[in-house]
Amino acid sequence: MKALFFGRFGDADVLSYGDLPAPALDAQSVLVAPTFVGLNFADIYRRQGNYVLQGEAPWIGGYEGVGHVVAISADVCG
C-alpha cells in the first residue's frame, strides 16, 4: 500500500512516501482502503513526537479519512 510515513520524530524532512506492507487484521478489525485522507495538526504533533504513538515505526500519517471497507475480521459485527 502507498503511505506517507515516518520512522523517527522530527521536521517534515523525516516524511517519506512509498510502499508499506498492508496491515494485518486482528480479530476485531476492519480494513479500509482510503479514498481521501486528511492531514491535520495532530499529524504534525505526532511526527514531532509531541503525541503518544502506539506500536513500532514506521508510523503512518493521516488519521482522518474516508474510504471503502475491503476486509472484516470474524469477530466484527454490526
Image (cartoon, rainbow, N blue to C red):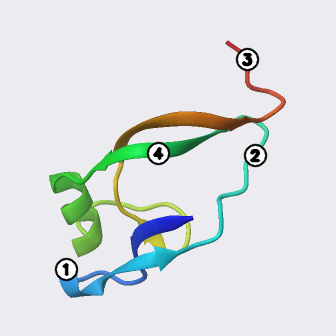
Q: Which of marks 2 and 1 is in front?
A: 1
The answer to whether residue 34 is left or right of residue 37 is right
**Which residue corresponds to mark 1?**
12
Residue furthest to the right in view is 74
Badge 1 amino acid: Ala
Q: How many marks?
A: 4
Residue furthest to the front in view is 35
Per the image, label 4 sits on a secondary structure element best described as strand
Q: Do the residues labelled 3 and 1 touch (CB within 8 Å)?
A: no
**Which residue corresponds to mark 4?**
34
Q: How far apart are marks 2 and 1 (CA)?
A: 31 Å
| Quarter holding residue 39 | bottom left
Rendered location of residue 24, percent (x, y): 72, 56
Q: How far apart are marks 1 and 4 (CA)?
A: 22 Å
Q: Nearer the viewer, residue 61 or 27?
A: 61
Asked if 3 appears above or below 71 in the picture, the reply is below
Q: Are marks 2 and 4 in contact (CB under 8 Å)?
A: no
**Which residue corresponds to mark 3?**
77
Q: Which residue is drawn at 35% across and 44% down?
A: 36
State the mark number for residue 26. 2
